[in-house]
């Protein structure tokens, strides 16, 4: 028999699930987010395994759209645990103190058909820098895809041990391919 | 030195062959020393540099191996010295295996690097094509193969060097002298 209490419990557990799967949320199983750094001329691309976000895209009124992305800095996977552990250290992402890198749009403007620029603070390692992100949009049966690339300065966010600066470029290119839950 | 040969076959290797032999030998020792010491290092800029040096040395060996093979195929080596048949066969087997590894070992390192997600950029400026796509499982297998071939090369180079030293110091023949620079 379903008591009122258990019904309430059921309701409480269902509500967050409904929120997670809301339209506009990023389907992280289909989306990708990578960072490409360059060491002694060699470009190396590696993925962030855990991120989430919400892109409320309104094609009819692009300016009313919003975007918010949260990335777990500890989920950067360089293909080896020793390197992954290095990147989580204080000098790099300092994932213990700053588990998340966040981008939150404050304004979005259309750049023609299926293109927009999202502007807002990008916060990494507790430091916020206003960033403009050009995004292209493509809708299909699978959902709406948002693709783009931004270049970030490690130094601007205080990411990296200076001892590495001779072998590692300051600029890091971030590629994203986000697909919204239908 | 030895008597004037009756045929056109020279009694010693050409200056080019000798230079290629010793430059490649020195590079193999460098690549082996780097490869052996860099893998156990903790993550550091030095480790990363050593990996790059190792790759550049390996690619240099590959380029010189091509030059060497071309030279060998277009120039007559000196006639075989009078040694027991088993020694001549053993020497030919080791020489053949060394030639194969001069190509195979740099190539196996190249594909391993690609599978691990690292393009090889020769001397930090010349990007070489990726031979395989990034794949963690493939990379692990290739890493083991590359390491195994490295030890094969170590054993063969050791045998080759020990045999040369034995011929020089014990037998007192020209095996080593004809591969050494003219004094």
Image (cartoon, rainbow, N blue to C red):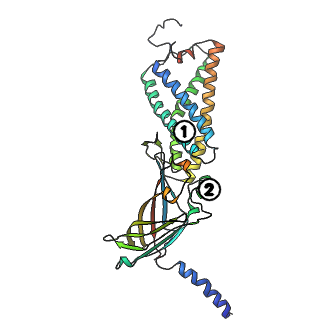
Residue nearer the viewer, A35 or A133: A133
Q: Residue drawn 50% across and 42% down?
A: B110
Q: Residue drawn 45% across and 70% down?
A: A179
**CB under 8 Å between callouts 1 and 2?**
no
Please give the label number shown on residue B5: none
Where residue A98 sits, quadrant-wise, is bottom right
Please give the label number shown on residue A85: 2
Residue density around tag 2, few if under 14, some if 14–19, many if 20 or more, within 10 Å? some
Q: Give how far across and how far down residue A10 sits, in percent.
A: 63, 86
Instruction: Give a yes or no on whether discs 1 and 2 share a subunit.
Output: no
* Label 1: element kind: helix
Please give the label number shown on residue B54: 1
Q: Nearer the viewer, mark 1 or mark 2?
A: 2
Q: Give how far across and how far down residue A119 sits, in percent.
A: 41, 69
Q: Give how far across and how far down residue B96 sits, in percent.
A: 54, 28
Against A74, is A105 above or below? Answer: below
Against B95, is A67 above or below? Answer: below
- What is the total number of numbered labels drawn onto the structure image? 2
Q: Give how far across and how far down residue B180 sits, in percent.
A: 54, 17
Q: Residue drawn 55% across and 26% down?
A: B95
Q: Quadrant of the N terminus of chain B?
A: top right
Residue density around tag 1, few if under 14, some if 14–19, many if 20 or more, within 10 Å? many
Residue nearer the viewer, A121 or A64: A121
Residue nearer the viewer, B57 or A170: A170
């Amino acid at each position: 028999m379903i008591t009122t209490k258990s019904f309430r419990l059921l309701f409480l557990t269902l509500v967050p699930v409904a929120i997670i799967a809301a339209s506009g949320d990023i389907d992280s199983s289909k989306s990708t987010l990578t960072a490409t750094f360059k060491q002694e001329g060699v470009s190396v691309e590696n993925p962030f395994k855990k991120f989430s976000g919400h892109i409320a895209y309104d094609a009819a009124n692009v300016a009313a759209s919003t975007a918010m992305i949260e990335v777990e800095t500890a989920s950067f996977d360089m293909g080896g645990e020793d390197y992954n552990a290095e990147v989580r250290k204080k000098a790099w992402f300092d994932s213990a103190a700053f588990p998340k890198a966040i981008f939150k749009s404050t304004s979005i403007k259309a750049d023609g058909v299926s293109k927009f620029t999202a502007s807002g603070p990008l916060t990494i390692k507790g430091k916020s820098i206003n960033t403009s992100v050009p995004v292209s949009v493509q809708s299909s049966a699978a959902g709406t895809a948002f693709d783009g690339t931004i270049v970030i300065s490690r130094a601007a966010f205080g990411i990296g041990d200076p001892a590495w600066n001779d072998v590692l470029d300051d600029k890091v290119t971030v590629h994203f391919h986000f697909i919204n839950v239908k | 030195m030895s008597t004037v040969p009756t045929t056109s076959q020279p009694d010693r290797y050409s200056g080019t062959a000798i230079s290629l032999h010793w430059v490649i030998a020195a590079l193999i020792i460098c690549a082996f020393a780097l490869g052996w010491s860099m893998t156990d290092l903790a993550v550091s800029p030095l480790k990363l540099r050593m990996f790059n040096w190792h790759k550049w040395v390996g690619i240099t060996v590959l380029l010189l191996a091509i030059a060497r093979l071309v030279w060998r195929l277009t120039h007559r080596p000196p006639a075989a010295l009078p040694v027991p048949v088993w020694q001549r066969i053993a020497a030919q087997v080791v020489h053949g295996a060394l030639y194969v590894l001069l190509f195979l070992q740099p190539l196996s390192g190249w594909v391993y690097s690609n599978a691990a997600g690292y393009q090889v950029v020769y001397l930090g400026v010349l990007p070489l094509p990726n031979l395989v796509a990034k794949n963690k499982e493939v990379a692990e297998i290739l890493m083991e193969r590359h390491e195994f071939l490295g030890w094969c090369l170590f054993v063969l180079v050791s045998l080759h060097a020990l045999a040369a030293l034995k011929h020089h110091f014990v037998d007192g023949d020209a095996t080593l002298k004809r591969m050494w620079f003219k004094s």
